[in-house]
Amino acid sequence: MRTTLIVGTYLLASALFILGLKGLTHPRTAVRGNLLGALGMFLAVVVTLVDRRIVDWTVILAGLVVGSALGAIVATKIQMTAMPQLVALFNGLGGAASVLVAGAALMGFGLSEKSLALQYAAASAVAGLIGAVTFWGSLVAFGKLQVLIPERAMSFTGQRVFNAVLAVLALGLGAALIVSPESSGTWYWALVGVATVLGVSLVMPIGGADMPVVIALLNSYSGLAAAATGFVLMNNVLIIAGALVGASGLILTRIMCQAMNRSLTAVLFGGAGPPTEMKMTADEVYGGKVKSATPDEVALLFDGARRVVMVPGYGMAVAQAQHAVAELADWLEARGIEVEYAIHPVAGRMPGHMNVLLAEADIPYEKLKDLDTINPTFEQTDVVLVNGANDIVNPLARTDSSSIIAGMPILDVDKARTVVVVKRSLAPGFAGIPNPLFAADNTLMMFGDGKKMVLELIAALKST
């Protein structure tokens, strides 16, 4: 009866994971999906603790209280602009947990049964390798996003060869662990040490522009490490949960790669390769062509407008301008103007970054349009308001085959009747190249803080 109850609860938890993941595929059901997944994990943890009787209940309750308190504090205090860093850190903690749990289980396992020892050793090797790469790679990603280390790609000559050597060495240590389980402790921690260096070396050459891809990939790694740990512990629900996270993370990584015109191979082995030489400098692109406008001047554009599209970018996130943008949209809609939002898959610094910000401002999900849906409509759009976006609206992706972003799918905002760009300066985006959109004949620049400029625009509109 006890075994049936435990297995049944694990099955229920697994079903909740799948339903939760399905819910996360659409913004309208995302909150419910998140709650279902959390409930499944709660059931899985409780049943595992009851079944295995790992530690005293006092310790378990203390851990639950401390962990819940820390989670609640982080959830309420974290700024939406810092969400990518938080996701990167959570990915890393998942990898670290896999390393420590697999190592502890391996060290405490009696090697009397050779076949079982082989399973433990092989699963531990996989968990240690992927978990260590995930943890240290995620710490580097966190450091770049938090600007604790430079955001730019940092590499050295022969780094890909160095990474390949580390990968071969790690595989060799894993093989040694499997062949000689009696020395498992030595081989395992040596493997973790090599994987640590590999994790750092893999992510350091990747610049800020590729962070959405990196976060998705590291999320997948954390799931694969958890699945491997499930085989170490012979825990079915951990295997299922890890496999779901690993598979969904790989799918998301592929979507992000396609959205940035990056190959998965390039990301796996350290970035997009050497940058190409620019044909034109910023002075040649912008010189004497950029037209600056005030909020009062821009307000006049909306008088005859019938359709407006908002394009959010990372600059909007930094300025925390999402509520001001929503207020502007409400004002326009109250006067019969159609307003929609163009969402690029890699806008911001993590997958879905703009969706999360706009959802926080209670913007209806139906107004958020993806790239394929919104692009054909720009030619019928009167005004496009670009707030803090750069590379995702750069026409060079279409027109310059030598550009580092050549072939990258972009939002075709330059085809609209008028484009208004809210930006602090003409500084380049993550790709480090100028943007001809800013000097286009149909573009006006509102230089300043994203939130301040939108609020001044709203005041100007109300006074007209």
Image (cartoon, helix red, strand yellow):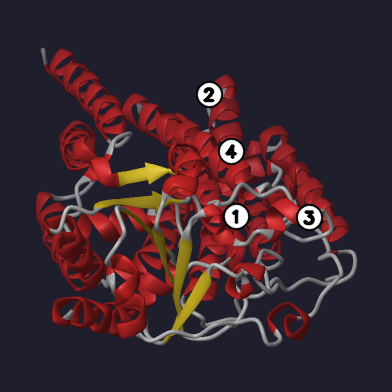
Quarter that holds the N terminus:
top left
Eye-nearest disc, 2 or 3: 3
Quarter that holds the C terminus:
bottom left
Eye-nearest disc, 1 or 2: 1
Eye-nearest disc, 4 or 1: 4
Could you tell me the amino acid type at mark 4?
Arg
Position of 330 relative to 57 (above/below): below
Mark 1 to mark 2 CA distance (whole Å): 26 Å
In the picture of the structure, the residue carrying the numbered disc 4 is 254
User: Residue 294: x and y, percent?
Assistant: 38, 86
In the picture of the structure, the residue carrying the numbered disc 3 is 166
- Answer yes or no: do the residues labelled 1 and 3 have beta carbons within 8 Å? no
Q: Earlier in the sequence, mark 1 or mark 3?
A: 1
Could you tell me the amino acid type at mark 1?
Val
Give the image quarter of residue 337. bottom left
Q: Earlier in the sequence, mark 3 or mark 4?
A: 3
Along the viewing direction, whichever of 379 and 114 lies nearer the viewer: 379
In the picture of the structure, the residue carrying the numbered disc 2 is 116
In the picture of the structure, the residue carrying the numbered disc 1 is 133
- Answer yes or no: do the residues labelled 1 and 2 have beta carbons within 8 Å? no
Could you tell me the amino acid type at mark 2?
Leu
